[in-house]
Image (cartoon, helix red, strand yellow):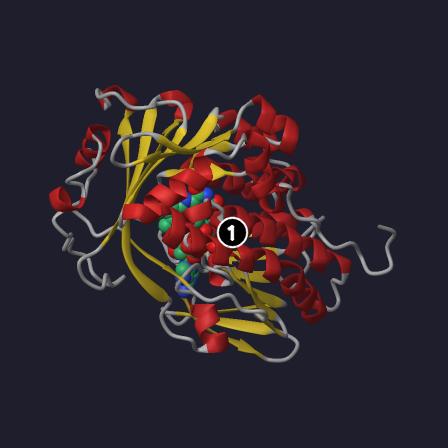
Amino acid sequence: MAGRPDPILIVGGGLGGAAAALALARKGFAVRVFEQAPEFGVIGYGIQLGPNVFPMFDRLGVTDAVLATALRPQAVLMVDSVDGGVVARIPTGASFLKRFKRPYVVIHRVDLHRVLLDACAANDNVELVADTDVEAFTDTGDRIRVRTKDDRSFEGAALIGADGLRSTVRQQLFNEGEPRLIGYVAHRTIVPMADVTFDVDRDNVVLWSGHGFHIVHYPLRNGTLFNIVTVFMTSDDAKPSDTASPHPDLAHVYRDSHPTMKALWAMMDLSRRGWVSSDRDPIRHWSKRRVTLLGDAAHPTLQTLAQGACMAIEDAVCLAELLAQTPNDVSAAFQRYQRARYLRTARVQFESRYHWDNFYHVGGIEREVARQIWSVRGEDEMFDCLAWLYDGFAIPQAQGAAA
Ligand SMILES: Cc1cc2nc3c(=O)[nH]c(=O)nc-3n(C[C@H](O)[C@H](O)[C@H](O)COP(=O)(O)OP(=O)(O)OC[C@H]3O[C@@H](n4cnc5c(N)ncnc54)[C@H](O)[C@@H]3O)c2cc1C
């Protein structure tokens, strides 16, 4: 269908914004996406995707393209940073597929973004506008106007803030200030698999948990690349504006850790500060009239459950579906959307915090207790714990429609 005259404006062309653009375009809405960066989709590094996101990919028509570049690990393992013993194991092979119907995959973020952006480019309803930093919006009652930092303005029927953790749209809606800092920083790096010469699991998602730090690694792109994320407590209050890298003495942080863990952090490029870990408290209301939020802008979470991007993509598909159900009442659709999404995303935020503090980073006897609790859990018990998340999300039906 040709684009409707009044586009829906999306601020932010990350995974959430791109998914929202595609979802809306497939429903026949004209969409204009503004991205502050000079190009869309350039942020690298790996990403894990749970089975819950695949029904969303089906609706976006991109499942095959995603699977073509993704890898399917056989397990997600948590191992002890000191002795390398398995603390918890989630099998992600045949039994997982049988239980959750859809796979657990790892994929290069650039590849996932490419799939979404290519699908957007192939749809006449989407206009991608790079190098455009949105500074403010005005809700005139029946329309939205946005103003960019370089003083351009654009108008549309509605506005979706998919502009991430430090969302400008959210700041204008709620004036809450900075997100909550938790005193950890994350560094991500990708190296050729051929450079990984020490003894390490190259096939699975492995999380080394320690007192005040963790490392996650997994293969990418057919096993040719190795993705490593190190996260550790900083000695000071890490600020997002810091560009230097005032690390704690890492040799001290990792002094008692397993030789593999030491070899892993030795491979990291730590010359830059990395991602300052932060989140916000969940909120119930993130829409006002013709303006709403999506993804990290709406419910920023710690990465403990590896679900931030999955939640953004679930948001995107849900939002497009609800808007298509009442296209002439944007405000009602946005209210229904936040009602449908806030509890699930809040649970991800709360559980991520809980496991960050009580499972990932504990030391001493607490670590031994955590290990005792988790190491005896069998496959079915693990799957049951994850069912609320991995069984997926039911998008509300049109009001009055048969269930
Ligand atoms: C270390 C780490 C590991 C992670 N691992 C996983 C994982 O394995 N699985 C998973 O599902 N999630 C993971 N996440 C979370 C995931 O990265 C985020 O939740 C997800 O990227 C959020 O997508 P988004 O589109 O909402 O926001 P973002 O990806 O932050 O995109 C926002 C976009 O908006 C643009 N923007 C911002 N302000 C403006 C403006 N004023 N004007 C125009 N454009 C603007 C930005 O440039 C950016 O492109 C991880 C996060 C971290 C930090």
The image position of residue 300, as x and y in percent, is 45, 59
Q: Residue at x 18, y 62 (%)?
A: 236
Queried on whether the Cβ of the residue with tag 1 lies below 8 angstroms from ligand 1, the answer reads yes
The image position of residue 166, as x and y in percent, is 39, 64
Q: Is residue 250 left or right of residue 178?
A: left
The furthest residue to the bottom: 140
345 in relation to 215, above or below: below
- Please tell me how crowded label 1 is: few (under 14), some (14-19), or many (20+) other residues with Cα within 10 Å: many
Q: Amino acid at mark 1?
A: Gly
The image position of residue 50, as x and y in percent, is 54, 38
Q: Residue at x 48, y 33 (%)?
A: 376
Of 279 and 65, the residue lying toward us: 279
Q: Residue at x 53, y 41 (%)?
A: 116
| Residue 43 visible in image | no
Which residue position is annotated with label 1?
A: 16
46 in relation to 231, above or below: above
Of 150 and 292, the residue lying toward us: 292
Q: Residue 372 is drawn in which quadrant?
A: top left
The image position of residue 397, as x and y in percent, is 78, 54
Q: Is residue 177 left or right of residue 7?
A: left
Q: Residue 269 is drawn in which quadrant?
A: top left
Of 105 and 115, the residue lying toward us: 105
Q: Residue at x 21, y 56 (%)?
A: 234
Q: Is residue 13 left or right of residue 29?
A: left
Element under label 1? helix
